[in-house]
Amino acid sequence: MTYQDIITGLFSPESRKSLDIVKIQGDASTRQYFRVISPEGSFISCYDPAFEALQGGEYPFLVLHELLAGHGIPVPGIKAVNPATGMLLLEDCGDLLLQNIFGSSLQDDIPRLYRRIIDILAGLQAIRSNSDSIPFNLSFDREKLMFEFDFFIRHGLLDYFASIYRKESISELRTEFESITGILVKPDKFVLNHRDFHSRNILIHHDKPVIIDFQDARMGLPQYDAVSLIRDSYVNLGPVLTDELKQYHYDALRGNGIITTGFDEYLHYFDIMAFQRNIKAIGTFCFQTRVRNNNTFERSIAPTLAYLSEYINARTELAKAGELLKPIIERYTA
């Protein structure tokens, strides 16, 4: 059975003869996407092999969709699902990613849109539950953060950057990564995070943000998603808007009763979390480039490396790691 046959089966018999199905490009995941034009309107069909393989278990996307939609977080609506084939039919919220606003006629709307998105983020991070199920039983714990650091070591230092990085430094650097992880694992400060809250996972539909790709949500410091958005690997907000949005996020957290700490502490965790998150992103870009032969992410390596010096210079806890990463940072940001 083809994807077209499966998608056709999600529609009423009256509509099936008039469908126009076109494959569209996804991002770095194994999911496949199709735009479906039907007499009932336009929809996005998503095939996810993880959904097909689940065989009756809880599918994180649907769990998170219900949770987020129930708390007023703007996410695409669901028209139909077929677990047996791994296919979902979703509301079509268009093609305008937040990333695409930059350099367009909507450039002047960027500050307003980002403030609105941070309002949405604060609403997401305010969601609480006593449940021990997805996503509240997942977190950026030591194992997860070190997995991401080790992913960078494997695909960055030992592969992509191997020609300019001394293997002898890796053990010492990993010890520093362990120390940084210890700073960030603070379960008493954890809130719900989207996990990939950046400009490629936010659509602008009818002038309003819509959040997508939220199935990997988990608990962590509130700065995690803020870093993803404000220190984005795909767009650079510049220092003025960056500082304004840090303050705006902090004020939103305080206003929603999510944190009670001072702004200096917020900034301290922001910088250290940003270091970890950007290192993680670089590892992903190296993996996509060398293992998946997907060169679209290679252009984001240097801009992400360029962020690191600011955190390293601001926080003594990052100084040693920064010194050990200096050969890479200097080569790619000179």
Image (cartoon, rainbow, N blue to C red):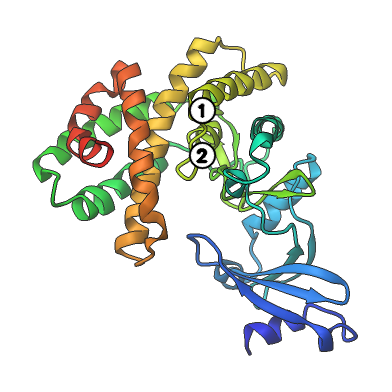
Give coordinates of residue 53: x percent, y percent.
Answer: 56, 72
Q: Is residue 88 above or below residue 62?
A: below
Residue 125 appears anywhere in the view: no
Q: Which label was assigned to residue 126?
A: none
Q: Amino acid at mark 1?
A: Pro
Label 1 element class:
helix
Foreground residue among 327 and 257: 327
Give coordinates of residue 323: x percent, y percent.
Answer: 19, 27
Q: Dividing the image into 4 quarters, which one contains the N terminus?
A: bottom right
Task: State which quadrant residue 111 falls in.
Answer: top right
What residue is at 34 percent from the left and 49 percent from the top? Answer: 283
Q: Single out the residue that lies furthest toward the right.
A: 14
Q: Residues within 10 Å of mark 1 (few under 14, many from 20)?
A: few
Q: Earlier in the sequence, mark 1 or mark 2?
A: 2
Give coordinates of residue 83: x percent, y percent.
Answer: 68, 72
Foreground residue among 216 and 228: 228
Task: State which quadrant residue 113 falls in.
Answer: top right
Q: Is residue 103 left or right of residue 16?
A: left
Q: Which residue is mark 1?
A: 187
Residue 31 appears anywhere in the view: yes
Q: Amino acid at mark 2?
A: Ser
Could you tell me how far apart the alpha carbons at marks 1 and 2 are, in whole angstroms? 8 Å
Q: Which residue is mark 2?
A: 139
Q: Dividing the image into 4 quarters, which one contains the C terminus?
A: top left
Q: Is residue 89 above or below residue 331?
A: below
Q: Residues within 10 Å of mark 2 (few under 14, many from 20)?
A: many
The number of callouts visible is 2
What residue is at 33 percent from the left and 43 percent from the top? Answer: 302
Q: Are marks 1 and 2 in contact (CB under 8 Å)?
A: yes
What residue is at 78 percent from the left and 75 percent from the top? Answer: 37
Q: Is residue 325 left or right of residue 10?
A: left
